[in-house]
Image (cartoon, rainbow, N blue to C red):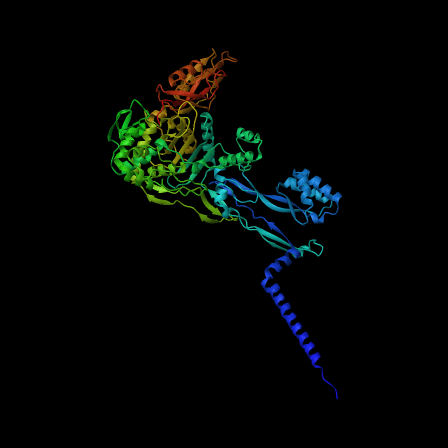
Amino acid sequence: MARGPSKSMNRWSLIVLIFLMLGFVILSGRLFYLQVVDHDFYQKQAIDYQTREATLSAKRGTIYDSNMKVLAQSATVTTITLSPNDIKNEEQRDLIVRELSRILELDEDKVREMSRKNTYYVEVKKQVERTVADEVRQFARENELGCIGYVESSKRYYPYGNFLSHVLGFTGSDNQGLAGIEAYYDKYLQGKSGRLVKAKTAKNGDMPVDYETVYEAQDGYSLVLTVDEVVQHFLEKHLAAAVKEHSVANRGTGIVMNVKTGEILGMAVKDDYDPNQPFVIADEEVRKAIEEIEDDEERRSQLQTAQEHQWRNKAISDTYEPGSVFKIVTASAALEEKVVTPDSGFVCEGSIEVVERKIGCWRTSGHGPVSFMQGVKYSCNPVFITVGLRLGPSLFSQYFEAFGLTERTGIDLPGEAGSIYVSEERMGSVELASCSMGQSNSVTPIQMITAVATAINGGYLVQPHIVKQVLDSDGNIIESFDTHVKRQVISEETSATVSELLFHAVNDADGGGKNAYVRGYRIGGKSGTGEKLGKEEDLYVASFLGFAPADDPEIAVFIVLDEAHSYSIYGSVLAAPAVANIMGDVLPYLGIEPQYTEEEMEGLDVTVPDTIGISPNSAIARLNAENLKARIVGEGDRVLAQVPEAGQPLPTESTVILYTEENPEDIYGEVPDVQGLTIAQANQAMTNAGFNVRLSGITNHSQSVLCINQSLESGSKALKGTVITLEFRDSAGGE
């Protein structure tokens, strides 16, 4: 009879079974942990071992001006890559290091360090231009170097260089916006990067193209600005000239704005920088001074400070005491509250006492008895202090807030600063007096022009903006930014009165803004001279804000010159002519037609008629018919030559030189120096020398109106009869 398993065998079988079951449980648990708990981790590891991935950069959207001129765009560039693990030997490594360093202009030691990394992917250099990338490709092809790779991306270009730099901003090496529009609208412009995924072989090579997966990049949206490239060029040209002429130490800024819509047609800061090379200090003197600093840490610190300074948009990021430009706000509030009318009477004795403190007028001798209209025209401090005190702290503060001066404007640019102002609770009579004439409170230029736009556009506070539309890659409009009216601050009637008062400030012969006069246009405006307190020396901010047409304002131009070192401190002398020059270019371009008075018509140009081949008497009659004079040179019976030539523009009452003989003598004259002379003196000197004169700038015959520039240099030779343009400016001062 067979015997069954012994008890000992059963026990061992049980033990083995238990261990097997325990092992199965542990193994199952481990598999569960690996496959479920750590699934994502090991899946990523597997993908990393089995695939090679490259980023496909999205093309950044284009930035256009209001007329679809390209201001910023992206072009294809290449990132040169290297697979160190695929380098076959040291001889090949030496060749790669030597040639890549030469072609890409890189340090040889750094390239060698890259080539020794234990990896299949190293970025050697980003944003390589096409011609350089093609040279690398040729080198790799000739030497059969499969370890060198290429990844296409995009690089930002600004075709106009320094143009509009503080508005456009710039991008970083990774195509992200770092300043200006580029930063503010980065989410629209940047797009979405794509990916190229390649399967790898067991030896880490690339599988055939069938094993590639491409996730296409999505290009960024494009922007259409409100800025007009032509207007911006006029603004930058005349602002740069003013900054240079008056040795402006702390930069100048200018804004051109549509006062009805809030659209910014131009915005500039001088000095500026090139957004194609934003990290290079544009000011040569500053750059050289930084380069000469021996301490590395100090040099880096100074470089960073200088970069941040040159990138800073002064129009929106810097506050200042606006001076008398702010009187427009005070006048608007006072007229709206009916504490004053244009005919209200005042007396200026050169100063006014407020709580035992004497506050002077810029005209220390005083203006005497004046109406409120004259007080605006003369920018009389005692008049505005009196008006401010009539308003009182509560009403004054209410209007200060209503005009948007206690808050940021909300313009679509990064870095906008807020104002620094005296609150109603802290405003005593002295503070109110100071604030009423534009001192004590600090605002930004964009806040100031927005407030003035409110005063003259019918009383509506509009939000300034600089982007008009967002477009997709097919040109479809994705989003539009229209006029945003926040509130009505003053009535349309009051606004019209303010505009009329400011028109007289520019167009009357005794107006404080007469240097902003442009023949044929109804321009209104106000100057400002703000003192910078707390400085070792007396420093000022000279400004002028002009607008046109005064009877239906559309365009405002604001120029601010910070710390000018010139023959005057006043905005009416330093900044107003720049506004006039900008208006003279911008208004005709925008289709705003001149409307000349009878007096202005008398000084307009006429077209010189053709007198060649006719008798001197007939020529004289033909010229007289065009209100021109004639001077005959020679004894001949026919006109052989004339200066100026036929078809040229010439001011009425000018003289045309008619030559009736070949090779006449005394055909050239020496240009006299008339700078610093009055209109009468300069005109007489030019006429005596045989030249015609075209007047620009201020053309009234006040003794304080002097020539500040002539189109032909004194001492040079020119044909007699040549038209020489003389620019005049009233240098008598006034805020």
Image quarter of the C terminus:
top left
Q: Residue at x 63, y 41 (%)?
A: 130
Residue 81 sits above or below residue 536 on the image: below
Q: Is residue 522 visible?
A: no
Q: Between 730 and 362, which is closer to the camera in this rendering? A: 362
Residue 471 seen in the current view: yes
Residue shown at 56% from the left, 48% from the top? 58
Q: Quadrant of residue 412?
A: top left
Q: Is residue 636 placed above or below 20 in the rendered structure?
A: above
> Residue farthest to the bottom?
1
Judging depth in this view, the residue of 468 and 54 nearest the camera is 54
Count the marks: 0
Q: Picture coordinates of residue 559 (x, y %)?
A: 41, 32
Q: Is the residue 26 above or below the residue 125 in the image? A: below
Q: Which quadrant would the N terminus be assigned to in this image?
A: bottom right
Could you say where residue 643 lies in the image, as x and y percent from the top left? Answer: 47, 18
Q: Between 234 and 432, which is closer to the camera in this rendering? A: 432
**Quarter location, residue 521:** top left
Q: Position of residue 72 (x, y in %)?
A: 52, 41
Where in the figure is residue 116, as x and y percent of width and height?
Answer: 69, 45
